[in-house]
Amino acid sequence: MMNNKFLNKLKYKAQELRKKTFLEFIKKGEAHLGGSFSIIEILITFYYLILKKNDKFILSKSHASFPLCLILRDKGLKPKITTHLEIDEKNGIHCTTGSLGHGFPIATGMAFARKKRGKKGKIFVLISDGECQEGTTWESLLIASKHKLNNLTLLIDYNKIQALSRLDDALPLNNLSKKIKSFNWNCITIKDGHSFKSLISNLKKKNKKPTAIILNTVKGKGIKEFENDPVWHARKLRGDEIKIGKKRLGIK
């Protein structure tokens, strides 16, 4: 049961992960802050509540890999903390990702292989909304539908900003849910992708079809001055920006 005490513990964990991620950005001298902070709650929900022994999680938008690697380290693994992930199965990295549009097709292949072999476990893949402009995304939707891959879940970080522009200015994804459903997928839209209550209740549902979950998120969530600003897709933290971030996150 999701009581307030339980939800508050998750919120505290999210705040701590933002702090650790921010400090790691300073240490490494690089920062994909916006897209990393938009998926904090999603990652926590999966790695501490949803994933089971035989499940696999793939982060296709691996420029946002710092918080994922920090979670894996918290769970006793030792992945290399890097902007783009390279396969390291023993440390929880199940495929190499970097160029956008690759993680979803790989996840689809994994789900197909598991279904063909009668192997247990689900495949979850998290992509950016910008990846929905890639042809491989729509090919994967077609293939998963044809083979009825109900062991596959696609998560879309819908923060509406890509690289240095807003999604609607670059290439709009109008009626995204309707488009996905037209491929005979189940599609759920979560209005607040930072709400643990909404995430947990929707992610635990069982489905007979491959399922997509559109997560409405805020790029740069947690630092008000950085939120919804395309510049924070990829930007090295400097001087006053470090001070602002530390103050907002409660880092002394």
Image: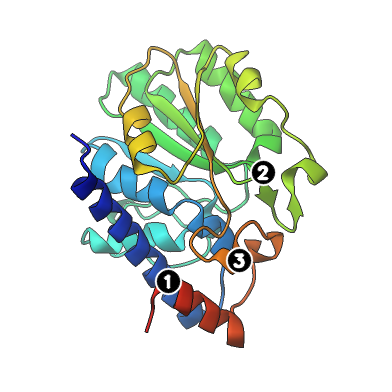
Please give the residue where the numbered disc 1 appears in the rendered image. Answer: 249
Q: Which mark is residue 226?
A: 3
How many residues crowd around disc 1 within 10 Å: few (fewer than 14), some, or many (20 or more)? some
Q: What's the amino acid at mark 2? A: Gly
How many residues crowd around disc 3 within 10 Å: few (fewer than 14), some, or many (20 or more)? some
The quadrant where residue 130 appears: top right
Quadrant of the image for the C terminus? Answer: bottom left
Q: Is 123 placed left or right of 53 in the picture?
A: right
Please give the residue where the numbered disc 2 appears in the rendered image. Answer: 130
Q: Earlier in the sequence, mark 2 or mark 1?
A: 2
Q: Residue furthest bottom?
A: 239
Quadrant of the image for the N terminus? Answer: top left
Q: Earlier in the sequence, mark 3 or mark 2?
A: 2
Q: What's the amino acid at mark 1? A: Leu
Disc 3, disc 2: CB below 8 Å? no
Residue 113 drawn above or below residue 182? below
| 3D distance between C-alphas at marks 3 and 2 | 19 Å
Residue 117 position, x and y percent, is 31, 20
Residue 143 drawn above or below residue 79? above
